[in-house]
Every structure is written in C-alpha cells, then in structure tokens.
Image (cartoon, rainbow, N blue to C red):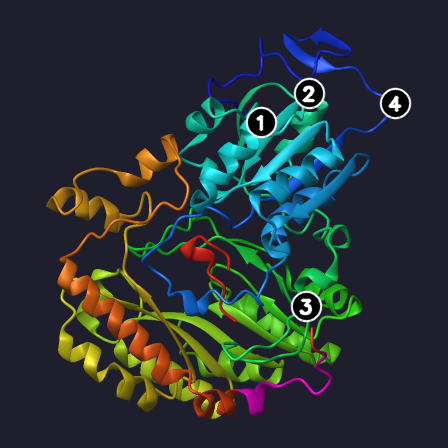
Amino acid sequence: MTTTNGSCGDQEGGDGEGLVSASNLTIWKKKSHPRKIMLVVLPHEGEVTDRITAKFYKNPVVKYMPLGVLSLAACLKGHDVSVLDASSKGLTLEETIAEIEKTKPEILGLSVVTYRAWAMREVLRRCSAPLKVVGGPHTTNNAHYILEQGADAVFIGDAEETFPRWLDQGCPKGTFTGQPANLNAIPLPARELVPLDDYRITPNQDLLFDVGSLRLPMFSSKGCPFKCTYCDVQQKTFNWKTPERVLEEFHSLMDIGATSIHILDDCFNVKRDRVKDICDLFIKDGITIDWSARATIEIREYLIEGLARAGCKRLHVGIEHLDDGVLTYFKKQQRFKHIEQFCKLCKQYGIHILGYFILGAPGETREYRENLPSMIRQLGISIPYFNVLSPLADTAYQAELFESGAMKKDFWKEFSADPVKDFIMPIVRDEELECEIEETVQKLIAEFNTNSEKDIVLTQDVVKDRVPSALTDASLAADC
C-alpha cells in the first residue's frame, strides 16, 4: 500500500481509540469487535447531464449490481459490512443520507464516478460517520480534491487488498493506490448483501431486448489494452479470471435465480485462447442459460462458432464507425472489412449484435449519417446503440481539443474541484452541427426501436420462464 508521499508513517488514523505506535506506523490494537462499515453507491440525483448517451438508453428498469463494491465487501470478512445501492433503489440524496445516518457506520465508503461528484461532496459534508473514504473511477485523477471535500482516505485502483490492509494498519489518512487484484484468489462478489428484487426487470416499451426478470452481470476480466482516442477506461492492464473461475461464478449466479448473465468486461475477447477455453468448458458442463458479453470485433470463425455452441446469445461490441478514415482516427484495430466479416459470422451462427456507434467524429459527413441506417441493416446488426462523440476527462480526444483550441478550459477539472448539481457538459463543436447530430441520433433511435423492429429480437431472445419484475460514466452505460 502506498500513499501520496510514499509512506503511511506519521499519519493519524481512526477515531483515536486504542492507538499504538509500531515501526513508525500508527495502527489499531486488535479489537474484539468488527468495524461497522457501510459501502454506498451514490444516487443519480444531481449527476452530470452528458451529451454522449441519449436518455432513451438510460432505461430506469435496467439496473446493474455494483460489482466493484460487492467484490470489496467480500474481502472484508470479520467486519460488519452493509451495502446501499442508492442508484438502483432510486433514492434521492436526502433519502440516501437518511439511510446512512440510520445505519450509523464507523466507516462510510463511497463508490464514485465523476458524474456523481456533487452527490459525493454532499454526502461527505453532511454525514456524521467518524471515517469517510472514497473509491471508484473518480479518484484516479481527483484524489486531492476529494480529500479537500471531506474524505479521510481515498483509494485509487483496485481496493480488494489495500482496503483490508488499511483497516489492519489503523485507517491512516491519505491516498492509497492498489494494483490489479488477483481475480482468481479473491472471493466472488458478495451479492448476498443486496436485495435481488432491486435488480429485477419489469419490461417496458423501451427495453432493447427481453431475457427474463433477473439479468445479472459479472466480470470475467478487467481492463482493456487498446487506446481508443475517445475512451476513458483507466485500467490498461488486462486482468482475467481462469475459465474454471468463470464457470464457478456462472453457477453461483444460476443458483440465485439469474435468468440471464451478462459478462460486463471492458473487452471479453482480448485473450482468444481463454475465450475458447471458456466456451469448451461451458459446452462440457452443459451451460444452457442465456448469456452475453461485451467484446471487440472478432473475425476468427472458430471463436464465433464456439461462442454460439456455448450458449452466447449476444455480443455487445464497440463498432463505433463504418468509415475507415474515422476508425483510423479513433485508433480502432478493425476496419470496415473486419466489421463485415464479424457480422457475417454472427449471422451465420445465430449470435445477435448490440453494436455501439459514435456520431460526430472529425471527418464524418452528413452523407455518412444519412446512409448509416441502410448500412446497419445490410450488416444485420439487430440492436444498434448510438452515442455522440464528447470529450471525457483525460482522454486523447480531450487533449486534441485543447491543442486545437476547440476547448478553452478543462471543464472536468473545474467540475471535480467544485462540483455543481446537474452540471451540463458543454458543447465542443459548432452549435448548428451539434443540433444536427443530436437530431440524427433521435431519428435513428426512433427508426430502430419501433415495436416491429424490436419484436424481431424479442421473439428470438425471450426466456420462457420470464417473471415480471445506467450507469452514468460513458464507459459503463447501461446496454439493455
């Protein structure tokens, strides 16, 4: 465990009870009772209004279990741990604070994405917990602001090892950076700490596809080694679970009643041999549950065939664009010929494609946008998902806008330093062009999400035993 100055020494920790000094480190004596810890996913109230993902795609009936928080909770054995997913529960800020105050945790841990920095600051300011700590993607480049805003400790990166060690070492104040956790050694996420009913889906007319009432996510890997210009995925080291571990987690999800499983990786198929081994293991084990994965373009026929035989029903893929010039600008690995081959293989083996597309790239023409619907249909992409190119913090695209003068100031830095409620992401292109692109997205959504279009997918994907029942960072947008 490291701190911002490279040492934990001389930092005070905890609430002052039972402190001793050992090896120049302030630590807690072993206590006879566990620490009372509450881990909180912040509410949507007050979050950033972005220009990336249309409201249509942020379907309120689609909720994902907070896997990062539940993974950390699983590593805190011996402590009294509770989890509050205020986002999925639809709580207001006031309701969230009331739940925290009712629980009276000794340690309050907040999982934060940048879009919810205002809610974070309000909770830090208003809650009475003796120790308040923050983790999540927002911490990576904003730890100093978070400490100024009331946090006692900030955790950057994976905290499954650093947080328990921090507890053992007396809860010192400061910033602590964790390395990628050993995903095969740590426990599976403690899903028992959240009510399953909070994640049941009651279908509405905007649902992109229907796979039953309890579609549960899991990570088979974390991180993405690719360097797309628009992307803010922070972990570039690919960290993966073994096929045996993936199968174990599948069974654990089926045991709690999942009707579908979504592998919510940054890029499932980075290691092709691992994917093949997973498929072989699923086939041997007789896995029949509906499942899907977030992946990249795949042109190896044996892998697409293996995925289909293993029961994969959908691949959620960042196609992004159908123009090779723009794909080159985005630093994507694929070109249009690869996209064509991928779509052909998926059609051949019966795998549906949820394809992410980005509009508004430099060099993109009006003619391209007008032809896009027919191109998507020709490719056979059954579920297109349209986003607008916008500068996320610390991305290559943001740096380019600074260099060109299109962005005069770092609005993300200003927002992180002084978060405001309902912050609206500024326009970074000509206003007339921005309006045209936004109108195009709305037309595309309407065109591809009529009842007749969706019925084609729903009738093929519906789970027979269905029971009635977004994440805000762009890299984690809800995709169901």
Q: Nearer the viewer, mark 4 or mark 3?
A: 3
Q: Nearer the viewer, mark 3 or mark 2?
A: 3
54 with respect to 59 (left or right): left
Residue at image coords 64%, 24% = 131
Residue at image coords 58%, 29% = 126
In the picture of the structure, the residue carrying the numbered disc 4 is 32
Q: Secondary structure at mark 2?
A: loop
The amino acid on which the numbered mark 1 sits, given as a three-letter code, is Met
In the picture of the structure, the residue carrying the numbered disc 3 is 200
- Give the magenta range: 458-467
328 with respect to 479 (left or right): left
Mark sitting earlier along the chain (3/2): 2
Numbered label attached to residue 169: 2
Q: CA distance from mark 4 to mark 3?
A: 39 Å
The amino acid on which the numbered mark 2 sits, given as a three-letter code, is Gln
* Nearest the eye: 29 or 213: 213
Question: Callout 1: few (<14), some (14-19), or many (20+) C-alpha neighbours within 10 Å?
Answer: some
Question: Callout 3: few (<14), some (14-19), or many (20+) C-alpha neighbours within 10 Å?
Answer: many
